[in-house]
Amino acid sequence: MHAQRRVTSKDVAERAGVSRTTVSFVLNDVPGVRISEETRQKVLRAARELHYYPNAAARSLASRKTHRIGLVLCQSPERIFVDAFLPEVLRGIGDVAQAQEFRVLLQSVENVAQSDTYTQLVGEKQIDGIILSGPRSDDSQLLALRREGFPVVLLGQLEGSEVPFVDVDSVGGARLAVEHLIEHGHKRIGLITNAPPQYTASAQRERGYREALEEHNLTYDRGLVRYGDFSEESGGRAMSELLEVVPPPTALFAASDLVAFGAMEATKARGLRIPRDLALVGFDDIPLARYVDPPLTTIRLPAYGLGAGAGRILLRLIKGEEARDTQLLLETGLVIRDSCGFHEGTTLERAAGGRGREVD
Amino acid sequence: MHAQRRVTSKDVAERAGVSRTTVSFVLNDVPGVRISEETRQKVLRAARELHYYPNAAARSLASRKTHRIGLVLCQSPERIFVDAFLPEVLRGIGDVAQAQEFRVLLQSVENVAQSDTYTQLVGEKQIDGIILSGPRSDDSQLLALRREGFPVVLLGQLEGSEVPFVDVDSVGGARLAVEHLIEHGHKRIGLITNAPPQYTASAQRERGYREALEEHNLTYDRGLVRYGDFSEESGGRAMSELLEVVPPPTALFAASDLVAFGAMEATKARGLRIPRDLALVGFDDIPLARYVDPPLTTIRLPAYGLGAGAGRILLRLIKGEEARDTQLLLETGLVIRDSCGFHEGTTLERAAGGRGREVD
DNA sequence: CCGCGTTACTAACACGGGTTAAAATATGCA
DNA sequence: TGCATATTTTAACCCGTGTTAGTAACGCGG
């Protein structure tokens, strides 16, 4: 049942009638070494005929490069959110890696704080660089890796840190959402955040909300702001509170779709209707946003771009290219459906840049 | 900026005052070699103090084992379905692999038929075994690997093939759904499949539907059966047709949640109400099933179990343990919500085995 | 014919750890 | 004490590739 003996570069060399070194030169296109066209062809043909694949272990041992990157997924409270976009993010990373002949090693981590899972990955020289999803600032492993100069890119940002990262432009996205409501005449716009304010993304979305209001000379009213905690339920509770305020808000920006769903249910439970009695805009555009009733107007995240961007930066770091533009904020897009009350026949997407095009 | 020189087993040996071989014996717990407790402790301490991690490349080169498994994701028309469960499947595979100190190498493949992507993974000796998601029977790479005796496990089955696989018990799941409707008095039960009948999963779900009917002495009426093609739209079209039949069905089994959503919309569009005018049961329990209106009663897939099962079988194959029980069908569960009309206060889950317990 | 630069190729060592066969040491028994 | 045997430890080679330093072949001017 066992496979036949492996084909090595020695076999290729013999078949081509040259030395092993020459084979290596040809197959790796070593710069500075000139090989006659005839020899080159002999080697390539022999390799093809023998179905030669260089042994990855031997290669990394000798070259001290693995041609692999690690993707570490840290469990976070935003599970639902992360899960919904994981396939797209993976595609983004995978495409970029594949294009440069890198492989992706996947690792999920339950408890970032104590285990040394990814330090181990690096110590064993399993990978040349690492993408860390859902980083925390109290992560000592991360600091240690940085100190050694090991290539690291974060998916999500660590405020005030100079670690390379790729993230969504949450401030801009929130502004997009709130401006949309303002432009259509709303003056009392409530906010339910996606998470407590100590979470970066939450603080940023609140900032975008505030900036949009101030730019249009509307006052930021603390009475119209509530803090969610990821869950749908928290959205429902917060909405119930906001509906008690007099006069109540005429519109709501919910800083995550899940929170928006909770708000939606709470609103309906009071016999109010969306968008007639309350205009609603969410954030994330998770897959089910278009299926709820009414379909949710929301901010779309560039999931594929996050993965691709992180991959690209990491590969640049690995190759030692100049380390500029290593912090990347990606633009979001406004997806107009029914919950905001401004759907006009076709659904429009207005990118943060201002261009509009049809979607869905 | 470069990291300090790597710690090798030689360093550990020197610090412990023994030979490199002894270090290897101790760290690998080589059977048949007895090491005095004193020496063992010296070695372990030295390794700890030096933060020694054995080099993965050197180790696989010498041992001819990579301690890595490949997970190959083939693009398939059921993208939405696969995507929704990917995180759970990954968790399943990851947990099992991690427990045995294996790593997971991820690879997505656009076009299974022509590229040699995973043959390459195997040829380069990047992995010891492979899990193939969404296999196709015309996949020549797969056959070649099998011929060589390389460990392969499929996620999804290839009918009539003896290749190891893990899949959902679609027949049982469909029976569960249809029996639920029958037990509550429905006699005219329509079926919209998830896909054209040449797809294994589609044929199996239709078989479960038919078996449930026949076992309860109801006749299988071809006029009440339509074929979907994965999409929501196809569900809507099929439903419109079924509603023209006289007399129309009083209940519907939609063999995928997405198709069920389409059917739901088509039904509502005619002014009919669910579940009053049509009882509906879906299949898959994708995350948004509980959010639609009314929340969808459906069949839950054991996503984590699929991943864990595939991982377990693959690791057994890799370790050369006896190759029995390599084809695994996992049980589904009925998740009762509102669309079937039998929700009684709390939502109940009836496992295929008959046990009931609360969920959601 | 010699010396000198190119060009085309190769011998030999390195990478770091697994593993076998043999050496060193400890133990048991008469 | 001497010798056989069990227990620990080690020297040496292997895995398959990259890479440096060096050799052979060739051309060319003097």
Image (cartoon, coloured by chain):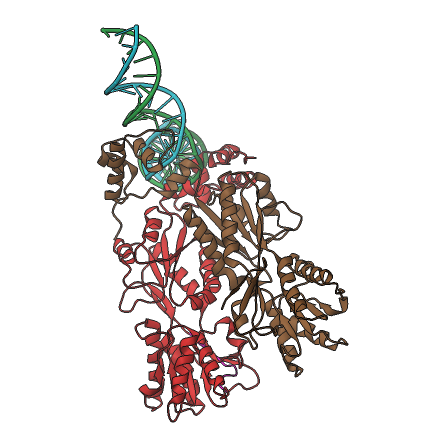
Chain colours: A brown, B red, C green, D cyan
Pick the residue in front: A159 or A289.
A289
Vertical side of A74 occupied by D12: above or below = above
The image position of residue B185, as x and y in percent, is 43, 92
Task: Count the numbered circles shown.
Answer: 0
Q: Tell me: B114 left or right of B275.
A: left
Furthest residue toward bottom: B247
Decide whether residue B52 is among the magenta residues. no
Decide whether residue B338 is among the magenta residues. yes
**Residue A64: quadrant of the picture:** top left
Q: Is residue B304 visible?
A: no
The image position of residue A213, as x and y in percent, is 71, 63
Q: Is residue B195 visible?
A: yes
Pick the residue in front: A231 or B97.
A231
Pick the residue in front: A243 or B21.
A243
| Prevailing SS of the magenta stretch | loop
The structure residue drawn at horizontal position 30% and vertical position 63%, both measured from the top left corner, is: B163
The image position of residue B323, as x and y in percent, is 31, 61
Please provide the residue range marked out in magenta: B332-341
**Residue A37: quadrant of the picture:** top left
Q: Tell me: A81 left or right of A4.
A: right
The structure residue drawn at horizontal position 51% and vertical position 44%, both measured from the top left corner, is: A122
Pick the residue in front: B121 or A246.
A246
The image position of residue A326, as x and y in percent, is 57, 45
The structure residue drawn at horizontal position 35% and vertical position 37%, both measured from the top left corner, is: A28
Vertical side of A351 occupied by B10: above or below = above
Vertical side of B38 occupied by B344: above or below = below
Q: Tell me: B291 left or right of B284.
A: right
